[in-house]
Amino acid sequence: DAGVIQSPRHEVTEMGQEVTLRCKPISGHNSLFWYRQTMMRGLELLIYFNNNVPIDDSGMPEDRFSAKMPNASFSTLKIQPSEPRDSAVYFCASSLEREQYFGPGTRLTVT
Amino acid sequence: GENVEQHPSTLSVQEGDSAVIKCTYSDSASNYFPWYKQELGKGPQLIIDIRSNVGEKKDQRIAVTLNKTAKHFSLHITETQPEDSAVYFCAASMTGSQGNLIFGKGTKLSVKP
């Protein structure tokens, strides 16, 4: 099993640009979670999907953030336009029951 | 909503000593408590979990205890080794939350050889 796959691993972009982060969950898992991790705020849940349906997006910071899950094997998190305060590590995790398994993360730097 | 407090924020021990990290939660409906280990540059890795129908669970050098009455749970690492150095997170969730985990702020454990 390849585990949760995220791409890109690192992204450096300029303020105002669109950023798209990608996630492939573990095959057979039915829930997918997007987290953001910063030193100041720790691990924050942004949004999660169950059976490809968004269940709770209350953690999405602003309308600049959007997430989609068009099928069971792919999800995207988009930031448009990006701002320097969006710099963080973004993790995707998937689960079948209670146990969540995390991907390696995408380190985003917005200059 | 649920709130998880974790202590200490940093912990330094000598190799071979034991390490204990403690967490408290606020919502008595929480019934699942996982622990994650995060090494530098990597995603959090699930190392052990406990459900509310169990008071203690052990896996080799790692154990977790749960006190439902006091609403706190702890991670115990015995015979620590330098490779145990990492940031450890506790979390809590409840049935019906579809796996929504509420995380503590993390504990940075340093094991000195």
Image (spheres, coloured by chain):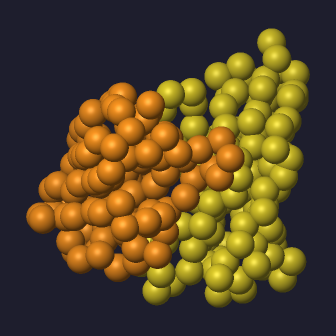
Q: Position of residue A13 (x, y in %)?
A: 34, 32
Q: Position of residue B88 (x, y in %)?
A: 67, 43
Residue at the farthest front position:
A16
> Is residue B11 shown above or below B32?
above
Query: Which residue does the image show at 72% across and 67% down from the upper left?
Result: B4
Residue at the farthest top position:
B113
Q: How many marks?
A: 0
Note whether residue A65 is visible.
yes
- B85 left or right of B76 in image: left
Q: Give the camera-side residue of A56 and B89.
A: A56
Query: Which residue does the image show at 80% across and 12% down from the upper left?
Result: B113
Note whether residue B58 is visible.
no
> Is residue B25 shown above or below A61?
below
> Is residue B39 shown above or below B65?
above
Q: Quadrant of residue A33?
A: bottom left
From the rendered image, report the letter of the chain displayed in orange: A
Q: Give the camera-side residue of A4 and A59.
A: A59
Q: Position of residue A20 (x, y in %)?
A: 25, 46
Q: Quadrant of residue B90?
A: bottom right
Q: Position of residue B53 (x, y in %)?
A: 64, 79
From the rendered image, report the letter of the chain displayed in yellow: B
Q: Give the camera-side residue of B107 and A86.
A: A86
Query: Which residue does the image show at 37% across and 67% down from the upper left?
Result: A63
- B97 left or right of A82 in image: right
- A33 left or right of B79 in image: left
Quadrant showing the N terminus of chain B: bottom right
